[in-house]
Image: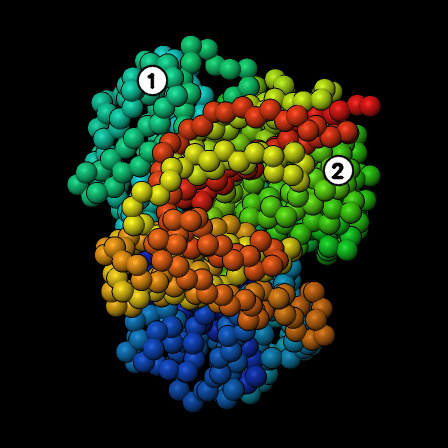
Amino acid sequence: MSSNDHKENKWGKLELVSPQQIEAGELACITLRYIAGTIGVARGGTLTIWTDSDSDWAKPQVEDPAADGYLNLVPPPGCAASVHTPDHKSFVVTLMSGKLAEGDSIDIILGDRSGGGAGLRAQTFYEPRRNFLCEVNPSGSGPDTWTPMGAETKSDSVKAAEVEQQDTNLLVLQGSSTGSATPAVLRISGGDASELSAIAPSDIELGSGFALQLKASDIWGNPAEKYRGKIEIKAPGLVVPGGNSLEFSEEDGGVRRVEGAVFTEEGATRIDIEDAENGLLASSNQIRISQKLPTLKLFWGDPHSGQIGDASKIGDYFAYARDVSALDFAGYQRNDSAHSTDEYEVQQVEEKAYHEPGRFVPLPGYEWSGAVEIGGHHNVYFGRFDRPMKRWRGADKLGRPDETDLPHVKDLHNYYRGTDTVITPHVGGTHANLEWHDPTLEPAIEVTSTHGSFEWILRESIGKGYEMGFVGGNDCHTGRAGDDRPGFQERRYSKGGLTGIYADQLTLKSILEAMKAKRVYATTGARIRAGVTVDGHFIGEKYSCGTKCEIKVDVEGTAALERIEVYRGLDLIHTEVISGPPTGNKIRVLWDGASRWSSYSGIRWDGHVYVSDGEIGEVSPIRFDSPRSNYERVGASKLALNGWACGYPSGLVFDLSKTTDAEISFAMNSSLIVGPTFAAHGEKQALRRMAHAPGDSVRVTGTLAQLQDGPMQVNLGHSNRNVTLELAPEAVSDRSTFTVLDQNVQPGVNAYWVKIVQQDMEMAWISPVFAEKLG
């Protein structure tokens, strides 16, 4: 055996014995086999098996072999082992008796079916390479300080010396040396198609070719790779090369990009697609076709995602952003204290490789991830490629000898002030502290992501008098830029957000210039088209005004609009109601709000809706972003409800199939996140888990006749928590144009901004126009 072979085999290897591919979200049985290397494993030695990024695998259970999710061990004859599952992404196997010599193996069966269980629920997101990593501590010695959840980085270097045991043929360690076995790799594929989507450029020139992106998605939002359906494409004046009917093939993998489509008619429209055989249909985002493209065109992107533990997947991230989510731009924003310089250089290579002005623009940068008391989390974007990363801490461990840190957000501001850098505060794993703000660097604030929607920080920035625009992102760990879903992730409650940006062209320079000019707005993921002017001045502009201001609002939604709210600062000055009055026996129940004004502020809701003398007919969920949000019929007149949400309304609409005057009762309980809990004495570097506490309980009742008087809403007193029982409004239009005249302009700067709410509870926050009244 060569010295290289010996080195590779030293720590052993982890093999995947079961099939190499499974389907996202399925109940799977996965068998991993650890084969000991030359160093072996002694009594007390451990194998820590973990995944390389956050995942929503079900946590294996170790109690009941007959139940789903059972984790079983099969050690060699004469050996005994224990298993410990500290969190959702790792487990630790300890050899309690015997030893593993080179070539000996132990099987680890996730979702063992031999006792009658159906398997372990796999992660819900598509991933070409899911790594099972294996950290080997052959002797079990050394301080117990490393856990996958707490680790910020992992070095495979081994410093302790090795000695050979003469009578056992087993290599053991002096000191606390550990190392990594060769990992096992599993492929997670998308499931069957449950929905279609179509994405086109927001602005299209009459007669010029454009690309239309078609996607078949499974129930988790992944590409439905097995989809082979036939789709009809329809829109006024649309000509598709090869005809308006196309069939998906194996090569498409659930996503089809149609080049060279042309519109022959001007106007605003959406493209409708339908798979009649499978009962699937969808409409695209709103499109405007004109003789000549406007100077400012609407582009869509995800400026904040990319929390991927394995740097070799960064290229996959940009490919997904461009080829699956059909984004115009995207930023890979890894937490700096978890991002080594070596990994950052991989990111920089991929940013340049995917840079294609006019088609797709990566935003170079990183996430400065300081604690709240020193500034909180901020996204950093560079106007040029190959700029160095300056962390809040960790240069000594993650960087090169000449690297230094920026330990406070004031240091961050001082370092980048006067450069072409753009910084945006946000609410993520830690929320930004707005005590420190540099208007020359920070033009916008992120208000929505997979963590939830955080209108409170938008309002806080306005309350402090800051002149900031609004952006949205995904902030996801799954690699699905632009279209992430929370799945069963413990710390995610929402679909990912998006940023709409008005720029003159799709280049890095133009995108960042538009951000600096605040020509941006945030959505909860829907490509809602919106434009706002105040006295002719577009979003982001600042000007001197008189005693009154004329606000013009133009919105084209992706679904029926419910209302549009116009604000001057923190004051609501106008609500444009687009939905129509209720006309039938449809009831809507909603729950809304957050646990707190902070990071990790989701709410678990549970309860029921009950009709005392009637039957509940068809039910339509609203913003059930997480699969943990669901309902169950309990007889003909009751629905049991479960909801997971953060900062946005969700609920359902149902028909009363019998018209009665009986009471409709809506009762909900909430469980609030009260903070992460930690090991030891609560050090922030230790293991994080979400801690919940019982919150509000509420019941509201009314008859159909009483609901004619208006919605019954109970305000629960904090963080916009409320529940609503009402007659469901009717859908009227997905478009609205109106004008508001404000005759109560205040002295100083008046920030006029707009909030859009669709009936499906998708939302958008349009950046302000800043009207300054002098004197």
Residue under label 2, please give it: 465
**Left or right for 116, reference 685:** left
CA distance separating discs 1 and 2: 46 Å
Rendered image quadrant of residue 61? bottom left
Q: Quadrant of the C terminus?
A: top right
Q: Residue at x 52, y 80 (%)?
A: 94
Q: Which residue is mark 1?
A: 262
Q: Residue at x 67, y 52 (%)?
A: 431
Q: Nearer the viewer, residue 294 or 672?
A: 672
What SS does tag 2 mark? loop
Point out residue 286 in the picture as x, y percentages from the top left corner.
41, 28
Whether label 1 touches label 2, CB < 8 Å: no
Q: Position of residue 404 (x, y in %)?
A: 79, 48
N-terminal of the pair, mark 1 or mark 2, is 1
What crowding class fits label 2: few (fewer than 14 Cα within 10 Å), some (14-19), or many (20 or more)?
some
Residue 295, percent from left and from top = 55, 15
Q: Nearer the viewer, mark 1 or mark 2?
A: 2
Residue at horizontal 50 percent and vertical 75 percent from the top: 85
The kind of residue on which mark 2 rests is Gly
Q: Residue at x 28, y 52 (%)?
A: 655
